[in-house]
Image: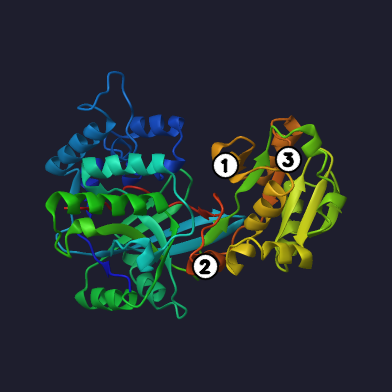
Amino acid sequence: MADVQPLRGFRYASEVVGDIAQVVTPPYDVISPEAQARYYERNPHNIIRLELGLDQPGDNELNNRYTRAARTFAEWRKSGVVRQEEQPAYYVYQQRFRAQGRDYTRTSLIARVRIEPWDARVVLPHERTMSKPKSDRLNIIRATATNLSPIMSMYDDPQGRIRRLLSNYVEQAEVQLSDEADEMHILHPIQDPQQIELIRDFFSERQLYIADGHHRYETALNYRNEILEQRKQLHPDDAANFVMMALIDLDDPGMVVEPTHRVLFNLAPEILNTLVPDRFADYFTVQQLPEQMQAKELLQKLEQAGHDTPSFIIHTAANNLLLSLNVAGKEQMAKSQHSEAWNGLDVAVAHTLVLEALLGVTPADITAGTHLRYIHEAQDALNEVSQGTAQVALLLNATRVRQICEVSDADDLMPQKSTYFYPKLITGLVMNPLW
């Protein structure tokens, strides 16, 4: 199914730029303005100048952060700051990190993957995208004709064959660096013809699931269509038909998905007053937890409850309520016009039966940020309630990897911010030219 090919990637020349750790960054969508400025100062060759350039006074159509990215990348190629691989290669990319008090290792294969429309069901999404990020990413690709960062995608390999193959290359890795979060990044090219053929054959029978990078995938599809319209035809192997991905085994022990909690604000007092145990009893088993429980204790309770049925915690200044979906709640979710897989998601249950049905927070309100915002740390969510900047904290379990694939297989899409894959893939280790 998936056409997964090696690429002649561009990589930084360490003898020119020095420490590679000084020129890479996290993905654009998690870089704050403060971090952006810091990366600019860190090294004159930092990838931030391409990935997320600074706007400047007087910018216009002929001189802006996109045209500067194009000029900078051309200068780097000419001066040898970045160099293209002489032979096509796959790249084993391993991340070693700490999360939730444990050490993890996640192994991926960086490759170029043939772009297919969603309805071809070769690459499957799990979330909707927004137009503004796609527009920005399209301008970057137009300017550089390059994928600067890989899309995180997943594949099913019950026997773990590819993961074992990749592990053979880790000890001799060409690139090993530690980033500012003290996470290790290890990269090594695979150029052996037999291994390349084996890997390509393996993926020809696989379906891919996007984990993180839906905007970039749709941008790649839009760019390919633009090029096709300009040229009237494209050779099947034209680079514009491909996008760079980091492919990860669904069962990789380092596949960590963290929850994204919600905080609610600007709710009318009469709405807020409905958040009491009796009001939830129709669709949930309700357990009232001690008011002074800390975030860690609440999450432990929540995790235990989530083994059996969709569950989440509603925290207000007056209550800590652990809600677990009951039989009547499951019957109500079955009326959602979504798939069975979608109806079993904690976040879908919370949005449908609490946010929409009880609190009257509509999908349009969520998109507009009228009453809801997202937060990663549970303690931060609790603090917002205690400090009065939010009225309600909605604490969630993480969505399981297999649940994500089941929703995608059912041609369904999750509510916004249903997943947070940790850590993000780094930007700048490998770049994929589209020419």
In this view, the residue in front, 431 or 120, is: 120
Labelled pair 1, 2 in contact (Cβ < 8 Å): no
Residue linked to disc 1: 364
**Percent x, y of residue 112:** 27, 61
Residue 179 in the image: above or below residue 270: below
Is 280 left, or right, of 159 in this rendering?
right
Residue at disc 3, secondary structure: strand
Gap in Å between the C-alphas at discs 2 and 3? 34 Å
Q: How is the image coloured?
A: rainbow
Dot 1 or dot 3, earlier in sequence: 1
Residue 7 in the image: above or below residue 375: below
In this view, the residue in front, 216 or 97, is: 216
Q: Residue at x 18, y 54 (%)?
A: 228
Q: Is residue 25 visible?
A: no
Q: Residue at x 26, y 37 (%)?
A: 45
Residue 253's tag is: 2
Residue 392's tag is: 3
Give the amino acid type for the residue marked by disc 1 in the picture. Ala
Gap in Å between the C-alphas at discs 1 and 2? 37 Å
- Picture mark count: 3
Q: Residue at x 65, y 51 (%)?
A: 351
Give the amino acid type for the residue marked by disc 3 in the picture. Val
Residue at disc 1, secondary structure: helix
Badge 2 crowding class, 10 Å Cα cut-off, few under 14, some 14 to 19, many 20 or more, is: few
Badge 1 crowding class, 10 Å Cα cut-off, few under 14, some 14 to 19, many 20 or more, is: few
**Percent x, y of residue 120:** 35, 67
Q: Residue furthest bottom?
A: 159
Badge 3 crowding class, 10 Å Cα cut-off, few under 14, some 14 to 19, many 20 or more, is: many
